[in-house]
Each structure stands twice: as C-alpha cells, then as structure tokens.
Image: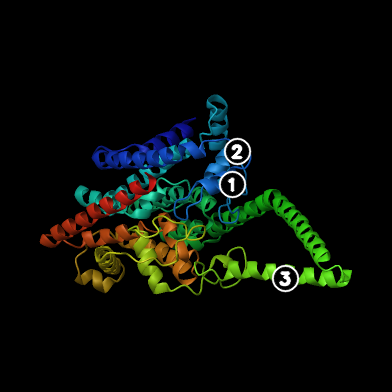
Amino acid sequence: MNQLKNFCFKAFHFLAIKKEERVVAYTILLLILFLNGLLVWHYHDTLTLFSDDYHKMFRNGFNVSGFDAWTYTVISKWSATQYNIFRHPLLAVYMYIPYLINQLLMQWTGVNCAIYIVACMQVFFGFYSFVFFYRIVREGLGLSRADSSILSLLFFSFAYILLTVMVPDHFNCSMFILLFVLYVAIVREKKRRQMGILQTWFFFFITAGVSLNNGLKVFMSALFANGKKFFQPKYFLLGIILPSAMIWGIARLEHNIFAVPEIEESQRQAKIRDKQIRDSLFHAYAMQNPQKDTIEIKRLVRKKVNELAYAKYMRDHHDKRRGQPIAKGEFIGWTDITTDREASIQENLFGESIQLHTDHLLDDILEGNRPMIVRYQYTYNYIVEGIIVVLFLLGFLCGLYIFLIHHLSSLSRRFPLVSSSAIGQFFLLMMTWFAMDMFIHVILGFGLNEVYIMSGHWLFIIPLTIAYLFLCTKGWTKHVLQILTGAVTIFLYIYNLSLIIGYFS
C-alpha cells in the first residue's frame, strides 16, 4: 500500500503544473483544445457513424497529409492488425481500454465516440509534451523562464507539431513518451543517478510498444546514464537483451494469432477472385473465338492475366511519388535509394515539417495528388527556413563546445565552465537520437517521401539544440537572439495556423 501511495505521489508530482509554467502551459492547452475541437467539428458528421467496415470508413473519410486514422478504427472495433504489428507491437493493446470506453459510450449515446476519445488523448499527450519540453529547457538546461518560454513556443509553432497534437496517429503519443524519457534522463544525469533494470523495462516497453525503432532511444539513454555499468552482464542481459527478445516474441505471437489467419483468408479470397477473372476471360474469349480450341483459349487467358499483373507491378513500382526501395521485405521495403536527398531535406525535412506548403496543402503523397517534392511560392519561406537551420547549426557548435570543455581536461582548464557536465552529456545523447533518425530517414530513406509526418519523433531536437545557443550568449547578442527567435515563432504561428484553419474550415 505504501509503495502504491508513493507511486501515485510521484505520478502526481510529474503531472502537476508548477506555478511558473501555468501561463505559457495553459495558453498552449487552449491552442491544443482549439485544434482538436476544429478537427472534431470538421469530421463530426462523417466519422461518428456506425459501420460494418470501419477500416474503409475511416480510410476514405479522413484525409490529413499522410497521417493514418487507424486509431479511430481500433477504438471503434478492436483489431490487432490495424497497426503494423512489427512496427507497433503493443499499440493495439494500449488502445483496448479506450475501445471498451467507446463501446459503453456507443451504447449510451447511439453515436460512435471514437473521435472524441482520441481528441481527449491527443490533448493530454500534446499538453504534457509541451510541459516536459519546457522542463527540459528550464530545469534540465537551466535557461531563464523567458528563454524557456520562447523555445517551447517555437517548438509548438512548427507545422507538423501543431498537426501531430490533433490528428489520430501514434506520433503524438510517441512524442510525449520520448520527451518524458529525455526529461527523466537529464534529471537523473544531473543527480548522478543510474537507470535500473525495472526502469529500463518500463521506458522500453511503453516506447517500443508504440513504435519499435524508438525503443533504441531508451537503450541509448540507459547507456549515457549508466556508463560502463550498461555492459555489465547482469544489466545487459536482463535490462537490454531480455526485454528486446520479449517484445519481438510478443510481436511474433501477435502476428501468428491475429495476422496469419487474416493473411491466409486474404490469399484464399485472392485465389477465388483470380479464378473468377480467369473463368470470365475464358468465357469471353470462347464466345469471341468459337473456332479456337480450349488450349489456345487458355493460352490467351494466361497472356491477358500476365499483362494485367505486369501493369499492376508497373503502377506499384514506378510511381514517381515513391522511391525505389533497397529490396522487398517487411522493413526494407520502406527504404528509398532514388529520391533526391538535397531537395527532400530542403522541402520536406526542414521545410514542410516546420512550414506548410501552400500548394497541395496537407495532401497525401500516396493516396492523393501531392508530388514528392513541393516548392514554396515565396522567398520569405526559405528565409525563415534558413534562419532556423543557421540557429540549429550554431546551437550544435555551442553544444559541442559545452560537451568538449567537460570531457577534455586540457580544455576544461583553459576555458570557464558554463554549466554542469550533465548538460554536455545530454547534448551528446540528443545528437545520438537525432543521428539515428537521420540515418533511418535520410541515409536509408525510410519514409523519406513523407518524413514530415514523423516529426513527433525527432523535430524537438531542433529547438533543444538551439537552447545551447541561448546558453552560450549573453548581453546584446542574447537580446538579438531572443527577438529573432520570437519573431520567427510569431510568424510560424500566424502562417501555419492560418493554413490549418483554412484547410479544416
């Protein structure tokens, strides 16, 4: 009982909004409530219906960039296979309680309340993502209240952060968990506390359960927190190898129980459709060519079927909106070796993620008409993008400087310490996370054609890195930096919100 009380007290302590956070945090809360209300209002008439095929209803009815609405489907009629099991091993499990709540509400109200339940979840995850980001900058990096507010507001002015906190995809949940892990990491690093086995398990399962690749970031955090202890047999076997094997085993078990029967049924239906097509073609050719024998007609049918199959292959593999993968496969098939990296970095990675393009606004690259690369119409968009990239690069250099003066004894004797060594260590952890995401998206090209929809996994690194530039400036340079960052933030709110509101209204 005492342990339960202690756990509840710690949870309340983490979630309680501190006095100095209230003004800026509640301002963002109002914004998140508005955005979710806008989305619910927009889709209320079409997505609150009952259906025999929720997958089809939400797939056809929801259209916001490349975001998926499978959470609506799972909460309407639970299924483990709506999400890709190997990429999101436990996400459907986490959605089972919201599904049960929706079942009760559907009986009481006669309305499918999935969009309302998801909106409540999005408000919670989005609000506390902002809170934990603010705390990382304020408590972890030690910036002033003004600087912490500016950087936190900058983060939430980015286009695909505004969208992430309102759409029914998993990225908002992932962003909340990742920022929570980062906050715990820097707090423990400053207190010189290591990450225990049970804590590693907890963070890994909630993170990897939502998105498997993000589980690696928990192990990176454990490596930085524990140092050499990370490789001790007991910790490495029980804290790293065992949970990794368990979550992969769970994914395989889910696949065999839920996915395999559906795949087999799909293959059986495909064979039936194939036979129907062949029989129909055979009958048509026989009517048109009564002089030909059965063998000749079957040859014509095979030729036509092969032509149809080849045409489908060409449609699937020669779409200019899709890059060519390294090879076929469950994971490797999402890679991309042909897309122009420079253009994608400029227009998608540091472009669309932060500022929406007015052309093909929030169109889906795979299901809609959006090309892979869209250019901005106005020069000022590129100027704003350039300012953010320059601030990011300067922040990187400042973070590298802070890290080096704490880890190279010769430098630490010659230069004054600007902060604790934990801040330098935290910078290296952030850059390791960012490097992993860039390797996945830019080098391997995983999801490169719509990298912006995954902004919740990595975009917070940009303002956190700029925070290191704030740490290294003072006097008039600090004032210039504050004014410049504030001006960019105001512009992004006006620009992105006007386009989002216009799209939904």
Going 24% across and 59% down the picture, which residue do you hit?
Answer: 419
128 with respect to 113 (left or right):
left
Taking the view exactly as shown, the residue that stands out farthest to the left is 476
Q: Earlier in the sequence, mark 3 or mark 1?
A: 1
Taking the view exactly as shown, the residue that stands out farthest to the right is 293
Q: Which residue is mark 1?
A: 56
Q: Nearer the viewer, mark 2 or mark 3?
A: 3
Mark number for residue 314? none
The amino acid type of the residue labelled 3 equals Asn
Q: Nearer the viewer, residue 462 or 425?
A: 462
83 with respect to 262 (left or right):
left
Going 51% across and 46% down the picture, which residue do you hit?
Answer: 61
Dot 3: few (<14), some (14–19), or many (≥20) neighbours within 10 Å?
few
473 with respect to 13 (left or right):
left
Going 54% across and 32% down the picture, which residue do you hit?
Answer: 101
Q: Nearer the viewer, residue 459 or 402?
A: 459
Dot 1: few (<14), some (14–19), or many (≥20) neighbours within 10 Å?
few
The amino acid type of the residue labelled 2 equals Ser
Mark number for residue 51? 2
Q: Earlier in the sequence, mark 1 or mark 2?
A: 2
Q: Splitting the image into 4 quarters, where does residue 23 fall?
A: top left
The amino acid type of the residue labelled 1 equals Lys
- The answer to whether 425 is drawn above or below residue 206 in the figure is below
Q: Which residue is mark 3?
A: 306
Judge whether residue 203 can be spotted in this image: yes
Q: Earlier in the sequence, mark 2 or mark 3?
A: 2
Q: CA distance from mark 1 to mark 2?
A: 9 Å
